[in-house]
Image (cartoon, grey):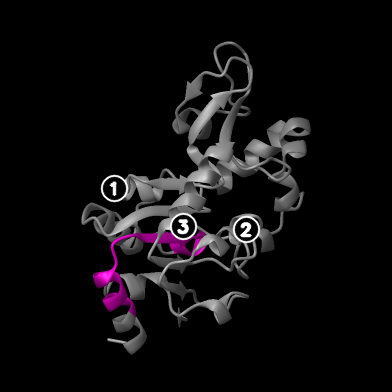
Amino acid sequence: MDEKIEELKKLVEKSKRIVFFGGAGVSTESGIPDFRSKDGLYNQKYDYPPEQILSHTFFMNKTEEFFKFYKDKLNSLKYEPNITHKTLARLEEEGRLSAVVTQNIDGLHQKAGSKKVYELHGSVLRNYCTKCGKFHEACEVFDCEGVPRCGCGGVIKPDVVLYEEPLDDKVVRGAVKAISNADLLIIGGTSLTVYPASSYISYFHGDKMVLVNKSSTQYDNIADLVIYKGLGEVFSNI
């Protein structure tokens, strides 16, 4: 086993309050494309830039175009958790991991069995009517033709944080508290370029910070251990 992975394994074994902070790289091994890599959503060609499509203004003004993209590219219902999701769920069950803080909206951590998950950018699994507030299942959004509508006639909006929208205060407070109370912070599958989510790791004051990513990040210099590998290779050994 790689000596750095062995070092991480030892840190995990002696830790009691692990927090995992993850991004799109956690789910790419389940087949879900990320956003910023050369094959990611932001580098594919559409009638409008994906950053524009995934904005509150675009959702309000070009709702039908929004849902064409959303249903085509962000449907995570057909994907299954991978070894990273499953290992994190097991560590929580063993009482070692206190929380997962994720920038992903795919719901795969919960599907793997994780209970304490702070979804900074929301989830495709939660959807609500913009008129009456009624909750709707994700399949009602992804399986419908055109714009999904509630029985009252209102548009059903996915509970995901679009550009121009604020993060949920309760979720942010929970994530920050978990990070600040952690003894080991493992950051994985994220370039740490998305603000404000990336800033929350500054609340960590525990023993060790570990970064697992295929490429370097701007925070590598403050980490105690940096592993430039895919998450699956690393977590299959934990």
Q: Hey, what amino acid is under mark 1?
A: Gly
* Residue 149 or residue 207, whichever sits in front: 207
Secondary element type, mark 2: helix
Q: Is residue 206 above or below residue 50?
A: below
Place of residue 17 in the rendered image (x, y in percent of width and height, measured from the top left): 33, 60
Where's residue 181, x and y in %?
42, 57
Whether residue 11 is in magenta: the answer is yes
Q: Circle 1 is placed at which residue position?
A: 113
Residue wearing tag 3: 179
Magenta stretch contains residue 9: yes
Residue in the picture at 24% in, 57% down: 90
Q: Earlier in the sequence, mark 1 or mark 3?
A: 1
Q: Is residue 75 visible?
A: no
- Whether 58 is drawn above or below 199: the answer is above
- Please report the residue visible at 57 percent of the width from the left and 58 percent of the height from the top: 200
Task: Return the residue found at the far top.
Answer: 152
Q: Looking at the image, is mark 2 or mark 3 earlier in the sequence?
A: 2
The residue drawn where x is 57% and y is 81% is 221
Residues at marks 2 and 3, CA–CA distance in whole angstroms: 29 Å
Q: Is residue 11 above or below residue 55?
A: below
User: Residue 139: which numbered mark, if any?
Assistant: none
Residue at label 2? 41
| Image position of 52 (left or right of 40) | right
Residue at 29% of width from left, 47% of height from top? 113
Q: Position of residue 114 (x, y in %)?
A: 32, 48
Label 3 Cα crowd, 10 Å radius (few <14 / some 14-19 / many 20+):
many
The span from disc 2 to disc 1 (Cα, nearest Å) is 27 Å
Give the mark nearer the N terminus: 2 vs 1.
2
Amino acid under label 3?
Ile
Magenta residues, start to end: 8-28
